[in-house]
Amino acid sequence: MEAYTGCQQLVTKQVNEDKSYWGLLCKYVLTNKYIWILSAADLCIYFVRYVTLSWTAIFLDTREVSKASIPLIFMLNPLVGSIGGISAGILTDKVFRGRCTPSNVIFFILLGISSYCFYLFAGPNHLFLTGFFIAAVSFFIAGPQSLLSVQISLLTTKESVAAACGFCGLFSYTGGFLAGSGASYILTHWGWAGIFNSCIIACATGLALIMTIWRTENRKSINKHNAGKY
């Protein structure tokens, strides 16, 4: 994969480093700021994902969309989400030379816009736009959802990739938990506007977290790319 894409490990274990697995886990996962930042961004994306999965059908019902139409609106979402993940991968490999951060930035921005537009237009008078924007949400969720795991695998050592991805998984489930209990609290106190504003806030937070990785990933990727020429 490294030879084909130019995408290489950005953090490597020191040659003479003699550490136990627990020592590697502490150094390259638990105290690795990149893993914490990306895991927090993953929490944001999963919050939006589970809010749209769990609450959108109820929201559409309150907008007086017929119960027969709601399943049809969601019909293409799995396919659209798959296309979104593949598109994010192609964009990362072909345009950004294996750097995930620029792709994630684009997808987070467009996800926030799509979430807001869905809130604005959802209803029986705009069924096409309702279906289009909920599909767009699925498309743009799939990009960061796929790429954040790739970034995490590159920003830790090969010896601790599985542990780092598992650590990130804890944040994913936390995002799902907040999308249930947290969104229920938001709905009770601030209504549906609060629910979709929370999705936009989650996108903005995830975007801000991802941006902190930009320079680091870019610099290390360039160094690795240049080193491969000699």
Image (spheres, rainbow, N blue to C red):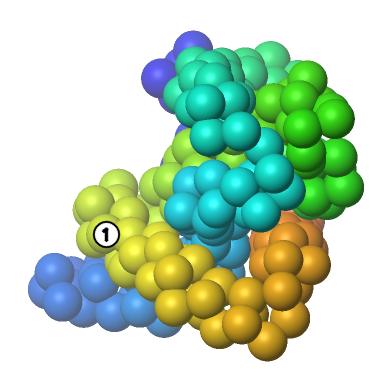
Residue at 72% in and 48% down? 63
Q: Is residue 207 left or right of residue 146?
A: right
**Extreme left residue here?**
20
Relative depth, front residue between 49 and 67: 67
Q: Position of residue 131 (x, y in %)?
A: 69, 26
Residue at 60% in and 41% down? 141
Relative depth, front residue between 137 and 129: 129
Q: Is residue 126 visible?
A: yes
Q: Secondary structure at mark 1?
A: helix
Q: Position of residue 13 (x, y in %)?
A: 34, 58
Q: Is residue 148 visible?
A: no
Q: Position of residue 2 (x, y in %)?
A: 45, 24
Residue at 33% in and 60% down? 169
Q: Position of residue 82 (x, y in %)?
A: 49, 21
Q: Give the image quarter of residue 106.
A: top right
Relative depth, front residue between 72 and 118: 72
Relative depth, front residue between 224 and 35: 35
Does 131 sit above or below residue 179?
above
Name the residue type under label 1: Gly
Q: Give the image quarter of residue 85.
A: top right
Q: Residues within 10 Å of mark 1 (few under 14, many from 20)?
A: some
Q: How many marks?
A: 1
Residue at 63% in and 75% down? 187
Q: Image quadrant for the N terminus?
A: top left
Q: Image quadrant for the C terminus?
A: top right
Does 92 sit above or below residue 9?
above
What residue sits right under mark 1 in the picture? 166
